Each structure stands twice: as structure tokens, then as C-alpha cells.
Image (cartoon, rainbow, N blue to C red):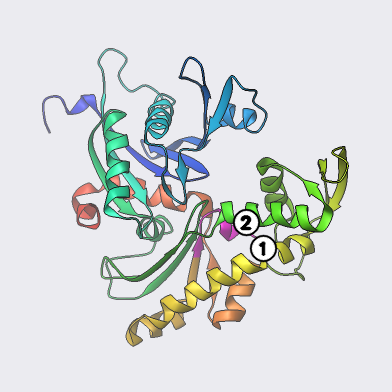
């Protein structure tokens, strides 16, 4: 142990398109929306996370809200740095008398480019990181749900996040085959927005679309224990006057059908590219679903019908990736070879 190691704080970050989670001392200490509110004139941050989310789509010309990540990667380098720095400040202070440097493990989509990878590292370093390690999201998800990624047995992970769906077959501490598609939670929201506009002549915001997805979202038009229809308020496109309508889970299943079909196709393509011995393992073990998309009602049943394989929803799927990132950080020596 170095003389000044006590000044280094280890943190694991799930830098997501929709939400950012930070793990410190084996606890998830930050779970906030990935959004920043800025003062346009003064060019300064006025809110981060939940507080900024409350302002989203309700700002006037002086303020604006920015989501610095899009499709799982950094779209706005400067705002991403502000966001990471601000969320790190939310961590309970370890040492009040000395400035702290950080060692970070950040999870990233498996299909990002070298330039996008560099942007994540640069943002973290600008935010105060001394060391930055990157781990692929499906690998972190597998570790987070308790799979032994080191054994010579195939495991298939489907992580449906906010910006990307990560599909990977993992064996012997490596990703054997993977598919990363930019269809996930954000695309589902866009599908709902389009459906409301075309079917109901009604304009709603992103926050309302997200609420519809969470409260009555479904992947099948017939499910057990269906949710109650919810009331949604928006603007009538014909008159411009606010109005209210009821939305059912069947309508949402219809709206999301095209995007879910694309996820099914990507899973089938990954299975097609999987070596036969690993295919045999997956036939026995099935597919593991993680990420917020795993909570979509009936999705596991729909994927099981399409692939003819057992499909398991991970316990607490929203936090699987950050837990896996935290485990890798805690045992850095044994997991460093999985990182870049």
C-alpha cells in the first residue's frame, strides 16, 4: 500500500444514457438521471440529476437541459464532464481535510468506437480521475448477477439500457460473440411519442412517454396481471388545447412492437454466430435479461417464444451493471484483464 493511498477513492460508475449510478464502499450512493440543467447566459450548471430532470421540457429561454449521453456514448463532452464531476460530489465525503483523487471503473457499451472510448476516459480524467478503467456492459452485467465469467461455459446476457441493447455470449472471461444495437429505452419513448401523435392526434413530452412506458409498458398484447389504464395529459394537435386520454398496455405493446422485433432479430443473429458447444450451454442455461428494459411486462415470455430458450429476468436488473462494475473494482487485480 502506498503512503498516500488513503487519499485515493475507488468508485464504480454505470454511466448510462438515462441514469447514472455510482457505487462506493460496496453501496450504491448515487442513482440519478443523466441530465444537466444549464444557464445559457452565464454558461454555468444550475442543476444535475433529479433536480435537472424536474426542469426538463419546462425551461424558458434562459435555461436549457442537456442529456450529455446519447445511444450509450458521450454526445456532449463538456456537459458530460460537468455531470460526472457533480455526481461525484454527491458521494459521502471520505476525507474532509485533503483533496481526493479517484480511481474509477466505468462500464461502456461493447460496440463503441475507439474515439467514443477515449471520450469517456477524457471526461472522467477531467472530472478528477487519476486512473480510469473501462469494462464492457454485458461483462459487468454478468458479474453483477453472479455468473462465473471465468468458467468454460457459455452464458448469454441481454442488457437493455436507455441508449443501447447489449447482447453478448460470454465464456472463459471473454465476449465470444456480441451485438450492440442502438435500440433501447430511448427508442421505446420515441415509439410512444409517435404512436400518441398518429393515433390520438396528441403531443406529449419525453417525461410523459417515460411514465407510460414504466406504468403500462408491455411487449405483448395479452399478459397476466395487466396494469390499469392510465390517464395522460397532452396537447391536441388539431386545436392546440390541452386534453386528457386513457392509455392501455395493449396500445403500448402495439407501439413498441417494431423496436422489440429488432431486438429479437439481434438476439437471433448473436445466437447464429455462437459456436455450437456454447450454443449447447445456452440451450441448457437460457438467456439472462438485465437493464431497465428487462422490466417491460411480457418481454421475457415474448423472447422465450421467439428463441425457444428459457429467459430469466435478473434480480434487480436496473442495478446489475453497476454491481458488476463494483465487484470488478473491488477485485481489480483479478478482473483488470477484462478492462481497457
Q: Quadrant of the N terminus?
A: top left
Confirm whether the magenta stretch covers residue 278: no
For label 1, count other residues whose C-alpha is less than 10 Å away and answer few (under 14), some (14-19) or many (20+): many
Residue 31 percent across, percent down from the top left: 50, 37
Q: Nearer the viewer, residue 246 or 331?
A: 246
* Residue 35 visible at all: yes
- Looking at the image, residue 59 sits to the left or right of residue 32; the answer is right
Q: Which mark is residue 188?
A: 2
**Which secondary structure lies at badge 1?**
helix
CA distance separating discs 2 and 1: 6 Å
Q: Taking 77 as reference, is 319 left or right?
A: right
Which residue occupies 36% across, 49% down?
A: 107
Q: Is residue 156 above or below residue 20?
A: below
> Does the image show residue 330?
no
Residue 237 vertical placement versus 268 (above, below)? above
Q: Which of 330 and 173 lies nearest the eye of the viewer?
A: 173
Q: Position of residue 305 (x, y in %)?
A: 61, 80
Left or right position of 262 against 117? right
Query: How many numbered circles are shown?
Result: 2
| Magenta stretch, residue numbers | 289-297
- Within 10 Å of the Cα at label 2, are there few (<14), some (14-19), or many (20+) other Cα atoms? many
Q: Counting residues from the N terminus, which is met first, the one under dot 2 or under dot 1?
A: 2
> Disc 2 on helix, strand or loop?
helix
Mark 1 — residue?
A: 256
Where on the picture, by quarter, is residue 251?
bottom right
Q: Position of residue 212 (x, y in %)?
A: 72, 50
Amino acid at each position: 500500500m502506498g503512503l498516500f493511498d488513503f487519499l485515493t477513492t475507488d468508485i464504480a460508475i454505470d454511466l448510462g444514457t438515462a441514469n447514472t449510478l455510482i457505487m462506493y464502499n460496496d453501496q450504491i450512493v448515487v442513482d440519478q438521471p443523466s441530465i444537466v440543467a444549464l444557464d445559457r447566459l452565464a454558461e454555468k450548471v444550475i442543476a444535475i440529476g433529479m433536480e435537472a430532470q424536474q426542469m426538463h421540457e419546462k425551461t424558458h429561454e434562459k435555461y436549457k437541459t442537456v442529456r450529455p449521453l446519447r445511444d450509450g456514448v458521450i454526445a456532449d463532452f463538456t456537459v458530460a464532464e460537468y455531470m460526472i464531476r457533480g455526481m461525484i460530489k454527491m458521494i459521502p465525503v471520505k476525507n474532509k481535510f485533503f483533496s481526493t483523487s479517484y480511481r474509477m471503473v466505468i462500464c461502456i457499451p461493447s460496440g463503441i468506437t475507439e474515439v467514443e472510448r477515449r471520450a469517456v476516459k477524457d471526461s472522467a480524467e477531467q472530472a478528477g480521475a487519476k486512473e480510469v478503467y473501462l469494462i464492457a456492459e454485458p461483462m459487468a452485467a454478468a458479474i453483477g448477477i453472479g455468473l462465473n465469467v471465468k468458467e468454460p461455459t457459455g452464458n448469454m446476457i441481454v442488457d437493455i439500457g436507455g441508449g443501447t441493447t447489449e447482447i453478448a455470449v460470454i465464456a472463459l472471461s471473454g465476449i465470444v460473440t456480441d451485438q450492440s444495437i442502438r435500440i433501447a429505452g430511448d427508442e421505446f419513448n420515441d415509439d410512444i411519442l409517435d404512436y400518441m401523435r398518429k393515433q390520438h392526434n396528441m403531443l406529449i413530452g419525453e417525461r410523459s412517454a417515460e411514465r407510460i412506458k414504466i406504468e403500462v409498458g408491455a411487449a405483448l398484447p395479452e399478459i397476466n396481471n395487466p396494469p390499469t389504464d392510465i390517464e395522460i395529459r397532452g396537447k391536441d394537435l388539431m386545436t392546440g388545447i390541452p386534453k386528457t386520454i386513457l392509455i392501455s398496455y395493449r396500445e403500448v405493446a402495439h407501439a413498441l412492437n417494431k423496436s422489440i422485433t429488432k431486438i429479437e432479430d439481434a438476439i437471433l443473429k448473436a445466437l447464429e454466430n455462437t459456436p455450437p458447444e456454447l450454443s449447447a450451454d445456452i440451450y441448457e442455461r437460457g438467456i439472462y435479461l438485465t437493464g431497465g428494459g428487462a422490466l417491460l411486462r411480457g418481454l421475457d415470455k415474448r423472447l422465450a417464444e421467439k428463441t425457444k430458450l428459457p429467459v430469466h429476468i435478473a434480480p434487480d436488473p436496473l442495478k446489475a451493471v453497476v454491481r458488476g462494475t463494483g465487484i470488478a473494482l473491488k477485485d481489480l487485480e483479478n478482473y483488470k484483464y477484462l478492462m481497457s
